[in-house]
Structure formats: structure tokens, C-alpha cells
Image (cartoon, rainbow, N blue to C red):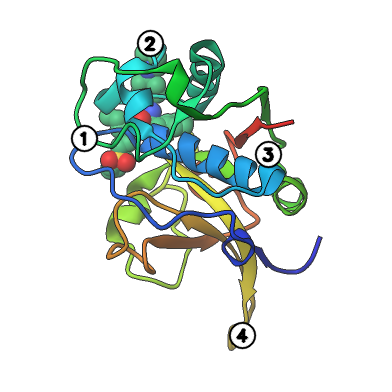
Amino acid sequence: PPASFDWRDHNAVTPVKNQGMCGSCWAFSTTENIEGQWAIHRNKLVSLSEQELVDCDKLDDGCEGGLPVNAYEEIIRLGGLESEKKYPYDAEDEKCKFTVGDVAVYINSSVNISSNEADMAAWLYKNGPISIGINAFAMQFYMGGVSHPFSFLCSPDELDHGVLIVGYGTKKGWFSDSPYWIVKNSWGASWGVQGYYLVYRGDGVCGLNKMPTSAIVK
Ligand SMILES: CCC[C@@H](/C=C/S(=O)(=O)c1ccccc1)NC(=O)[C@H](Cc1ccccc1)NC(=O)N1CCC(N2CCOCC2)CC1
């Protein structure tokens, strides 16, 4: 794989979204992974419905939390994901309004990806953006640059946020180079670097390598 790669340069990433006052980060991590899979394998980039997952995914807890691995399973059970347009986001738990006739995309299965960050970069380059869990402690104070908090401040064993890795690169420094991941967040475009988080790549910081997953679109 190349030294750097960014799926935003290959029309596989929608604009940054905002989950608002609802703990639905897991749904954004899931829909945005599938947006990437569909764009890469069907050459169609369409914004997908997080609200369908908040309302209809019975394995998860809507605004009270969830896991992409559960959401992939529920999307297969339901029969697919509607577009954001057809099933818009309301940032609150509501009655399920899923209509199978309005499905925009479907997935065939999902995979757990290796926690080795070199393997993750190779997988991303070959297949697309990766959904991850992360300890968001350092994200709450993030103002830019390559985030590399001490592990006692950002325990890799306390994942509490779902986000999406869309690329990777290396920042050339005065004394040393910093390899980083480009992470798409769901806290709006005024957060971080136009909505994105640059975090150190290579030492499992904040547990970002603990739960890398993706949907599979054949
Ligand atoms: C209250 C839910 C908060 C929400 C994200 C909110 S958030 O607003 O993005 C945020 C995160 C951190 C700091 C500040 C703000 N977090 C989650 O949904 C996180 C996301 C995550 C964690 C680990 C790996 C991958 C993804 N998940 C979780 O919070 N949970 C995982 C699923 C679990 N369910 C229990 C019942 O049985 C089904 C599973 C509920 C807790």
C-alpha cells in the first residue's frame, strides 16, 4: 500500500454529519462505512439513514449507544438501509418507520479486521473506510494536529465512541515524522479539522485498533 491514502479523494466519503444530542455515534460509524462500500463497489455515493438504525435496530440502544457489528447484522435482517433523504435524522429515539421498498443499499456480510495497524492500512487501501471504536477522551479537547495522548489518559480498554477511518498519512516533523490516521467524526464540520480527527498511527492509541470492522458489499 502507498505511504498515504485518502478515500475522500476517491469520492467514497459523504460530507461530515452531526449526531446532535443523541448517542448515535455507532449508527454514523456504520452508515458511513456502508456509504464507502457502496461507493467503491457500486460507484454510487449516497448518504444513508442513521435514523433507521436508531429506530429499527433492536440489538442496539438508539441514542443510548450501540455497536456497528450489531448494526450490520440488523441491516441484513431488515433487508437494507434507506437513504438519508427517505429516512432523515431526528437525533432522538422514535418508532421504526422502515419501508423495505425504500431501501437504497444492502450489505451481504461484515468482517472483523486485524488489529495490526499496518494490516489495517493495507485493508483500507484495498477495500475502503474502516469503522472503529475509540476512547474519545482526547477528542473532546482536540484542536488540530496529530493527537497522541498518553495511554493513562486514553485507556485502549475503554472504547466509548464509534467513528470511521477514511485514510492515513505521515506528518513530517522537525525531529520526527508522525504517522497518522484520518478519522471522520460525527460532531459537525466545525469540530476538529473540518470535522476530522488526526490521530497517531502505530501504537494502538486510545484503542483505535481494538474493534476495526466493515460491512461487505459483493
Ligand atoms: C451513550 C452512548 C454514547 C455513544 C457515543 C456518543 S458520543 O456523543 O459520540 C460521545 C462519545 C464519547 C464522548 C463524548 C461523546 N457511544 C456508543 O454508542 C458506543 C460506541 C462504540 C463503543 C465501542 C466500540 C464501538 C462503538 N457504544 C456503547 O456505548 N455501547 C455499546 C453497546 C451497548 N449495548 C448494551 C446492550 O446490549 C447491546 C449493546 C451499549 C453501550
Find residue 71 and report its horizontal and vertical position in percent: 48, 22
Compared with residue 72, is residue 134 higher up or lower down, i.e. above or below? Answer: below
Residue found at x 44% / y 38%: 48
In the displayed structure image, the side of residue 209 where residue 198 appears, left or right? left
> Can I make out residue 158 in this image?
no
Quadrant of ligand 1 in image: top left
Q: Which residue is under mark 3?
A: 115
Amino acid at the residue labelled 4: Phe
Secondary structure at numbered mark 3: loop
Residue found at x 30% / y 20%: 55
Q: CA distance from mark 2 to mark 3?
A: 28 Å
Tag of residue 175? 4
Q: Which residue is under mark 1?
A: 90
Q: Who is closer to the viewer here, 87 or 123?
A: 87
Find residue 39 and report its horizontal and vertical position in percent: 62, 47
Amino acid at the residue labelled 2: Lys
Instruction: Tell which tag, 1 or 4, sits nearer the viewer.
Output: 1
Task: Determine contact: label 4, label 2, CB under 8 Å.
Answer: no
Compared with residue 189, is residue 48 higher up or lower down, i.e. above or below? Answer: above
